[in-house]
C-alpha cells in the first residue's frame, strides 16, 4: 500500500506542475504534505520533516551551486566564452566546424548552467551561420548536445551535484565517470546526428543576430581555457589527494580540505576573479554586481532542489523508503536501468530535467544502499534518464524552436531526437562501465 501512495504522490506532483501550472517549489511542498499525511506521518511532524529536508538538501549544496553560478557568469561577461568558441573554430576549420561547436559547448557548458549557456552560445552559432552560410540546425545541434551532456552528467551542475550526497557518491569520481559517459553521448548526438540536417534550411530571426565583443577586448587564449577548465581539473585532480597522507595527520586534514568541492569552487572563483576580472581592468564593484545577478538567476533552481529534498525526507521519515527498497530490489532489473527508467518517465511527464533527476534520486536512494549499486554510476544513470525526450512541456524545447525558427514537427525531429540520443547513449555507457568496473 505504501508504494501506491508514493506513486499517487508522484502523480500529484506531475499534475500540479503540468496541468495546474503550479511553481515546482510550491508543488513539491504541497505534495510533501499530501505524502506525509497519506503515508501515516503524524500531522504535527510533517512541517518539521519538510523543513529538515529543505535544510539538509541545501546545506551541502547552496555554496557550491552559487559559487558555480558566479564563476559561469564571469566566463560569460568577460568574453572568455566568445574567445573559446572563436579559437576552436579557427583550429578545426569549416570542414570540422560541428566538432568545434561541440567542444565549445562542452568546455563553456561545464561552468555555465544550461539556460545561461543556451542564451549565451546560440548567438555564437548564428555568427558562424552568418559567415559560413551553413544551416543553423546543422551547427546548433552539436553545441546544444554537449550543453545537455554537461547539464545532466557533470558536477558542478545542479542535478548531478545534488544527487552526489543523496547517494553517498564522490563528487570527483562522479565527474571522472561522467566524462567517460559524456564524450560518446555528445559525439553521437552532436556531430554524427547533425549530418542529417546538412541540407536543412531555416531562416534565422533577425532578433537573434549576435553582437560580439571586439576582438581586442577579449581575454587571451590560454587565460580563457585555463580558467574555464580550472574547476574540472581541480575536482578531478583532488580525487586522490587524501590518499597521499596517513589518516589523522595534519597533512591528511589539509588535503581533505583542499579536495572538498566547496573549497575547489571557491578557489576557482577567486582565480577567475583575478585572471578574467581584476587583472583585465574590471572594477571590483562591477564584478560583485555580476555575481549578485548570477545568484538571482539560479534562485528558482535552488528552490526546486530544496523542494525535492523535502519530499525525499517525507519518504524517509515515514519509513516508506525501506518499503520501496525492498520492492524494487526484488525486481529482476539492473537498479541503474531502473533509475534511468524512473527518471525518463518523470522527465516525459514534467519536462524539467532537474525535477526529474532529483525526484528519481529520492526514490532510488534506498535502492542503492540495499542493492550495492555503484552510487556514482546511479547519478549518471538518472542524469541520462532526466535528459530523455524533451518535448512541448520543456522550456528548452520552445527555446530551440523559437531561436532556430522551426516548425513543431522539425523541432521534434531535431531537438527531441537529440535529447533522446543523449539519454540512450548515456545509459548504455553507464551499463558498460558497470559491467567493466
Image: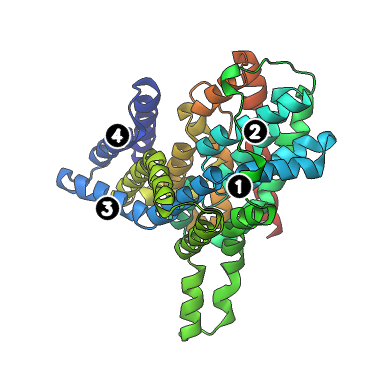
Secondary structure beneath label 1: helix
Asked whether residue 330 is in view, the answer is: no
Crowd around label 2: few <14 · some 14–19 · many ≥20 (10 Å):
many
Which residue is the extreme one toward the left? 44
Q: In the rendered structure, which disc, 4 or 1, sits on the residue that comes first in sequence?
A: 4
The Cα–Cα distance between marks 4 and 2, rounded to whole angstroms, is 36 Å
Q: In the rendered structure, which disc, 4 or 3, sits on the residue that comes first in sequence?
A: 4
Query: In the image, what residue occupies the spot 44% across and 57% down?
Result: 165
Q: In the rendered structure, which disc, 2 or 1, sits on the residue that comes first in sequence?
A: 1
- For the residues bearing labels 4 and 3, Cβ distance under 8 angstroms: no
Secondary structure beneath label 3: helix
Q: Judge depth for marks 4 and 1 and give the one in front.
A: 1
Tell whether 118 sits left or right of 101: left
Q: Judge depth for marks 3 and 1 and give the one in front.
A: 1
Tell whether 297 sits left or right of 112: left
Crowd around label 1: few <14 · some 14–19 · many ≥20 (10 Å):
many
Secondary structure beneath label 4: helix
**Looking at the picture, how far across and down is residue 211, in whole percent?**
59, 30
Query: In the image, what residue occupies the spot 68% across and 29% down?
Result: 127
Q: Which residue is mark 4?
A: 26
Q: Which circle marks residue 80 in the picture? A: 1
The Cα–Cα distance between marks 4 and 3, rounded to whole angstroms, is 16 Å
Q: Which circle marks residue 124 in the picture? A: 2
Q: Quadrant of the C terminus?
A: bottom right
**Looking at the picture, how far across and down is residue 85, in whole percent?**
68, 41
Amino acid at each position: 500500500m505504501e508504494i501506491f501512495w508514493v506513486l499517487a504522490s508522484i502523480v500529484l506532483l506531475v499534475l500540479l506542475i503540468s496541468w495546474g501550472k503550479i511553481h515546482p517549489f510550491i508543488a513539491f511542498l504541497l505534495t510533501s504534505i499530501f505524502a506525509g499525511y497519506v503515508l501515516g506521518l503524524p500531522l504535527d511532524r510533517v512541517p518539521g520533516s519538510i523543513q529538515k529536508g529543505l535544510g539538509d538538501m541545501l546545506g551541502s549544496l547552496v555554496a557550491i551551486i552559487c559559487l558555480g553560478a558566479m564563476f559561469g557568469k564571469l566566463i560569460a561577461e568577460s568574453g572568455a566564452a566568445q574567445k573559446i568558441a572563436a579559437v576552436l573554430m579557427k583550429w578545426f576549420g569549416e570542414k570540422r566546424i560541428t566538432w568545434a561547436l561541440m567542444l565549445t559547448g562542452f568546455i563553456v557548458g561545464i561552468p555555465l548552467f544550461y539556460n545561461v549557456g543556451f542564451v549565451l552560445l546560440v548567438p555564437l552559432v548564428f555568427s558562424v551561420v552568418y559567415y559560413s552560410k551553413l544551416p543553423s540546425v546543422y551547427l546548433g545541434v552539436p553545441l546544444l548536445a554537449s550543453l545537455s551532456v554537461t547539464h545532466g552528467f557533470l558536477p558542478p551542475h545542479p542535478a548531478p551535484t545534488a544527487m552526489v550526497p543523496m547517494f553517498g557518491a564522490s563528487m570527483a569520481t562522479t565527474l571522472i565517470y561522467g566524462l567517460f559517459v559524456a564524450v560518446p553521448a555528445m559525439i553521437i548526438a552532436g556531430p554524427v546526428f547533425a549530418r542529417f540536417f546538412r541540407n536543412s534550411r531555416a531562416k534565422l530571426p533577425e532578433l537573434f543576430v549576435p553582437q560580439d565583443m571586439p576582438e581586442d577586448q577579449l581575454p587571451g587564449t590560454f587565460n580563457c581555457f585555463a580558467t574555464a577548465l580550472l574547476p574540472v581539473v581541480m575536482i578531478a585532480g583532488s580525487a586522490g589527494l587524501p590518499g597521499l597522507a596517513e589518516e589523522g595527520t595534519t597533512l591528511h586534514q589539509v588535503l581533505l580540505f583542499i579536495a572538498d568541492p566547496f573549497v575547489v569552487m571557491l578557489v576557482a572563483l577567486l582565480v577567475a576573479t583575478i585572471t578574467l576580472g581584476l587583472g583585465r581592468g574590471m572594477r571590483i564593484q562591477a564584478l560583485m554586481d555580476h555575481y549578485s545577478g548570477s545568484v538571482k538567476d539560479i534562485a528558482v533552481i535552488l528552490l526546486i532542489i530544496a523542494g525535492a529534498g523535502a519530499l525525499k525526507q517525507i519518504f524517509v521519515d515515514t519509513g516508506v523508503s525501506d518499503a520501496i527498497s525492498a520492492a524494487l530490489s526484488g525486481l529482476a532489473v539492473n537498479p541503474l536501468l531502473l533509475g534511468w527508467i524512473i527518471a525518463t518517465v518523470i522527465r516525459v511527464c514534467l519536462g524539467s530535467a532537474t525535477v526529474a533527476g532529483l525526484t528519481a534520486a529520492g526514490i532510488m536512494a534506498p535502492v542503492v544502499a540495499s542493492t550495492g549499486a555503484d552510487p556514482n554510476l546511479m547519478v549518471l544513470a538518472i542524469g541520462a534518464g532526466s535528459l530523455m525526450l524533451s518535448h512541448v512541456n520543456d522550456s528548452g524545447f520552445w527555446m530551440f524552436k523559437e531561436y532556430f525558427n522551426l516548425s513543431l514537427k522539425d523541432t521534434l525531429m531535431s531537438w527531441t531526437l537529440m535529447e533522446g540520443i543523449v539519454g540512450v547513449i548515456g545509459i548504455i555507457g553507464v551499463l558498460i562501465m558497470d559491467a567493466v568496473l
